């Protein structure tokens, strides 16, 4: 029933780059000399061998992907290249010469720019002040020549074709624009190699597209890009070469054109993932009992006139491009955002939901797309995180029964297969996939009948991803109605029984069964 | 699955002692207790008077009332906020009760009225913080000034003499029950109650969640506004209670009473392990924090160190405590 992985990876969104890939650069290095060579790097941390003899090389004008599950050593490798860590063994060679990179500053001097997953800009300062932060720091002028910086920032930014003004405050920019500023900042130091660490984790489809068109423009000038991602489709659409790491070891380096997604995924996880998605509902999804009915729902400018029904046991996908209003629909239904029109019916009766606790009392819960800031209590224990939504059932007369609390938390650890040292472990130290499972455990503690899952597998590794898919299907089989919001089209297509597509705040139709194809979904999402 | 904190198998006393020591030094409160014990041992050699019941009593009395205020401050800080107004509120509530008494109202009626007013000042703080959206720092800084100003207005700048209050009321501040000063008794009851509720009650757990991550609390269905409102009401109420206990003890209400208490209370909380970022801190820790500060003060008095040194030393202790904590606990996490 699922399309084979290769078919799912047809280019549907990003423009193909390819034509300029082999173009010789005019920036002065000998063609063929890699910008960066990593030779037999090993790095050991107490208790783990983070990297064991890893080598790779990046040619000018190419995009080189580094993929692997969480803990595979991608970040350690990047941190070695960027001078954050010193390798125990091995060498980093830049432009053919062995480089001593003792700190991030050295790396910058050698032309290595590192754009971290988390944006690290000064939100209150202007774009130009951010771009030239280290230039200003190095400068021995007492008075800053701001006009000069504004002019140079404008020159840098013009190359990106992005609508960013040097005098704008960074806080006014979208996340993708901020990422562009990060890249411009790296370029301002004449960097020749840019490391992009999961740059699209926080981006919508459209923003991702914009970012890649900029990256493609950059590599045409001879810059090399090291691209780290979980998202196979982006890797296959944009990268020339893929290096696969697993458990700190180099598994393979392949040319994108000569491999398939499933081959790469198999190498990442070290086993064949035969079924990527659990089997769908065999019955007609829209014939079951109606759990939730939405009539003409609207919220401010975000979306309007949205109607749909959610049935017992089905997984309904909610897809749309940036600004389509997907998350906002779920938040509005759950009372996390104001409803300006429309009705919400639970089990056929209209209900008033003024706040999230109202929604919870009707058996509806919302999994946030922003795990770190809206989901987790990072410094707190796994046990306390799981309890946060429902203290009532583990307490009597407003006093918490800590035995009940522990038992419940342990129950979710085994039910969800959370890999942790125990219920006392701080969630900050868990991997992304396990953190996500903790959040899911928290939601399940209220025994919801209706689940809204906003980007349930964003930024987590392939193994945990398919475990969560399976979990969602199991919940559906037990009669829960699930709405899955995702930016990943393969996930929507592979997991959902029906798909509601949004375009600029309005619904452009609901599809089911064989109607759900990439072309159909994309066409509706683009409003064609 | 178990957490690793299972009950150990039965064994001998030496093992127990070793484990207790290990546990003590692992927790913030443990380090503090060890420090306090260390100072007491040292002081007992330096001054024969130090370990006498009289000195013990004086020392605990010196921080018992402020300790009640520290409980409120801890809860505010665990919630991720700060309350700079506690010292001023304490002075104002004492002054209001005193003024009402002087104008002919029974102190037994005046005191509860003043306490309600204390809670209302907290409501006022909470309103500006949760509804208007001002930062707790700014809001309570304003309240610090407003309440202090009001205390001067109420007393017209002159300490109110309240010696004519009935002895039964003054006994709250000065009396003993079974050899224990009433104030200390009240303080200990509050500490035990607050510490228990902090660990076990759903309401204070919500305070911790909100302090740990306000957004995550919101997305867990916690009524964040109500929680925040509650902690400021509680903090002002406890400060007001401190004010009432103080007038019972000293039989005067002075407008400049307890100035600077807010900073002492914050220091105590931080020494006890509370974080300015919220989500962290325990009642016991903060109480040991203020106890440590009080013991140092007493020690300096006994050692005939000029009183002018006290603030200087308190500041150094704050820095030392926080640095030690940083290197032993936070680093490497």
Image (tube, coloured by chain):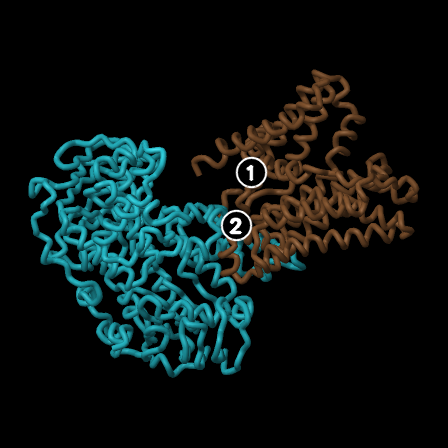
Chain colours: A cyan, B brown
Chain of the residue that carries numbered disc 1 in the rendered image:
B
Identify the residue shown where x is 26% and y is 53%.
A229
The C terminus of chain A, quarter of image? bottom left
Q: Nearer the viewer, residue B242 or A270?
A: B242
Which picture quadrant has residue B52? top right
Residue A369 falls left or right of residue B195: left
User: Residue A509's x, y, as percent?
Assistant: 32, 80
Residue A41 position, x and y percent, is: 22, 36
In this orientation, does residue A133 appear? yes
Q: Residue at x 27, y 48 (%)?
A: A151
Q: Could you tell whether A295 is left or right of B169 in the image?
A: left
Q: Is residue A444 above or below residue A223?
A: below
Residue B212's label in the rendered image is 2
Q: Share a chain, discs 1 and 2?
A: yes
| Residue A212 position by quadrant | bottom left
Question: What residue lies at 70% left-to-right and 19% top-to-bottom?
Answer: B305
- Residue A19 got which mark? none
Q: Nearer the viewer, residue A69 or B127?
A: B127
At 45% from the left edge and 81% from the top edge, which residue is drawn? A295
Closest to the observer, B275 or A389:
B275
Does A404 sit left or right of B242 as displayed? left
Q: What is the CA distance from the residue labelled 1 to the residue labelled 2?
A: 35 Å
Q: Earlier in the sequence, mark 1 or mark 2?
A: 1
Q: Position of residue B30 (x, y in %)?
A: 59, 33
Tell me the tag on residue B9: 1
* Res B285 seen here: no
């Amino acid at each position: 029933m699922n399309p084979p992985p290769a078919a799912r990876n047809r280019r549907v969104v990003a423009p193909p780059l390819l034509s300029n890939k082999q173009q010789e650069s005019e920036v002065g290095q000998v063609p063929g000399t890699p910008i960066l060579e990593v030779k037999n790097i090993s790095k050991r941390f107490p208790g783990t061998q983070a990297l064991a003899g890893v080598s790779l090389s990046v040619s000018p004008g190419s995009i080189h992907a580094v993929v692997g599950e969480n803990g595979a050593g991608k970040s350690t490798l990047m941190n070695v290249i960027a001078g954050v860590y010193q390798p125990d063994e091995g060498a980093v060679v830049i432009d053919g010469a062995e480089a001593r990179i003792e700190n991030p500053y050295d790396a910058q001097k050698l032309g290595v720019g590192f754009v971290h997953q988390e944006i690290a800009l000064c939100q209150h300062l202007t774009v130009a002040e951010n771009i030239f932060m280290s230039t200003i720091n190095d400068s021995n002028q007492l008075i800053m020549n701001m006009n000069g910086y504004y002019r140079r920032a404008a020159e840098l930014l013009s190359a990106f074709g992005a609508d960013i003004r040097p005098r704008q405050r960074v806080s006014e920019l979208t996340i993708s624009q901020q990422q562009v500023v990060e890249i411009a900042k790296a370029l301002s130091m004449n960097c020749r190699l840019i490391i992009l660490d999961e740059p699209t984790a926080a981006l919508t489809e459209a923003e991702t597209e914009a970012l890649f068109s900029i990256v493609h423009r950059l590599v045409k000038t001879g810059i090399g890009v090291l691209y780290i991602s979980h998202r196979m489709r982006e890797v296959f659409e944009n990268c020339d070469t893929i290096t696969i790491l697993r458990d700190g070891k180099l598994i393979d380096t392949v040319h994108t054109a000569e491999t398939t997604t499933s081959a790469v995924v198999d190498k990442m996880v070290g086993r064949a993932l035969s079924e990527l998605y659990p089997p769908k509902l065999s019955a007609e999804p829209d014939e079951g009992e109606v759990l939730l009915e939405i009539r003409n729902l609207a919220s401010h400018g975000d979306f309007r006139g949205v109607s749909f029904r959610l049935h017992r046991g089905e997984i309904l996908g909610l897809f749309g491009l940036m600004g389509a209003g997907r998350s906002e629909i779920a938040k509005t239904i759950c009372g996390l955002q104001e409803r300006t029109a429309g009705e919400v019916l639970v089990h056929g009766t209209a209900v008033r939901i003024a706040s999230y606790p109202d929604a919870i009392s009707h058996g509806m819960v919302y999994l946030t797309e922003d795990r770190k800031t809206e989901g987790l209590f990072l410094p707190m224990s796994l046990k306390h995180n799981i309890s946060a939504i429902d203290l009532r059932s583990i307490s009597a007369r407003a006093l918490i029964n800590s035995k009940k609390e522990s038992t419940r938390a342990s129950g979710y650890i085994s039910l969800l297969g959370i890999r942790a040292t125990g219920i006392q472990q701080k969630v900050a130290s868990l991997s992304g996939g396990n953190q996500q499972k903790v959040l899911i455990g928290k939601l399940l503690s209220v025994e919801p009948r209706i689940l809204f899952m906003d980007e349930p597998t964003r930024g987590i590794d392939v193994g945990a991803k398919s475990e969560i898919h399976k979990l969602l299907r199991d919940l559906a089989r037990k009669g829960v109605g699930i709405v899955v919001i995702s930016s990943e089209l393969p996930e929507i297509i592979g997991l959902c029984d029906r798909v509601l597509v949004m375009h600029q705040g309005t619904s452009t139709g609901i599809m089911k069964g064989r109607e759900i194809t990439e072309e159909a979904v994309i066409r509706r999402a683009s409003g064609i | 699955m178990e957490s690793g904190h299972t009950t150990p198998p039965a064994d001998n006393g030496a093992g127990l002692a070793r484990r207790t020591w290990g546990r003590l030094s692992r927790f913030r409160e443990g380090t503090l207790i060890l420090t306090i014990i260390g100072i007491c041992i040292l002081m007992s050699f330096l001054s024969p008077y130090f370990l006498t019941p009289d000195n013990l009593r004086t020392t605990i009395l010196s921080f018992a009332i402020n300790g009640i205020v520290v409980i409120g401050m801890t809860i505010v800080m665990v919630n991720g906020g700060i309350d700079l107004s506690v010292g001023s509120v304490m002075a104002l509530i004492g002054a209001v009760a005193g003024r009402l008494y002087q104008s002919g109202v029974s102190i037994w009626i005046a005191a509860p009225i003043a306490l309600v007013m204390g809670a209302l000042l907290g409501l006022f703080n909470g309103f500006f913080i949760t509804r208007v959206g001002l930062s707790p720092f700014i809001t309570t800084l304003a309240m610090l000034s407003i309440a202090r100003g009001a205390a001067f207005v109420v007393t017209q700048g002159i300490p109110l003499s309240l010696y004519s209050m009935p002895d039964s009321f003054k006994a709250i501040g000065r009396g003993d029950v079974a050899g224990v000063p009433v104030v200390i008794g009240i303080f200990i009851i509050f500490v035990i109650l607050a510490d228990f509720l902090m660990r076990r009650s759903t309401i204070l757990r919500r305070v911790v969640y909100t302090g740990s991550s306000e957004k995550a609390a919101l997305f867990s269905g916690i009524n964040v506004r109500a929680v925040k409102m509650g902690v400021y009401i509680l903090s002002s109420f406890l400060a007001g209670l401190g004010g009432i206990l103080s007038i019972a003890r000293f039989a005067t209400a002075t407008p400049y009473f307890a100035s600077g208490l807010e900073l002492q209370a914050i220091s105590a909380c931080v020494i006890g392990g509370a974080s300015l970022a919220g989500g962290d801190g325990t009642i016991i820790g903060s109480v040991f924090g203020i106890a440590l500060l009080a013991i140092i003060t007493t020690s300096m008095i006994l050692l005939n160190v000029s009183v002018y040194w006290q603030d200087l030393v308190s500041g150094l202790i704050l820095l030392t405590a926080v640095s030690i904590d940083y290197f032993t606990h936070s680093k490497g996490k």
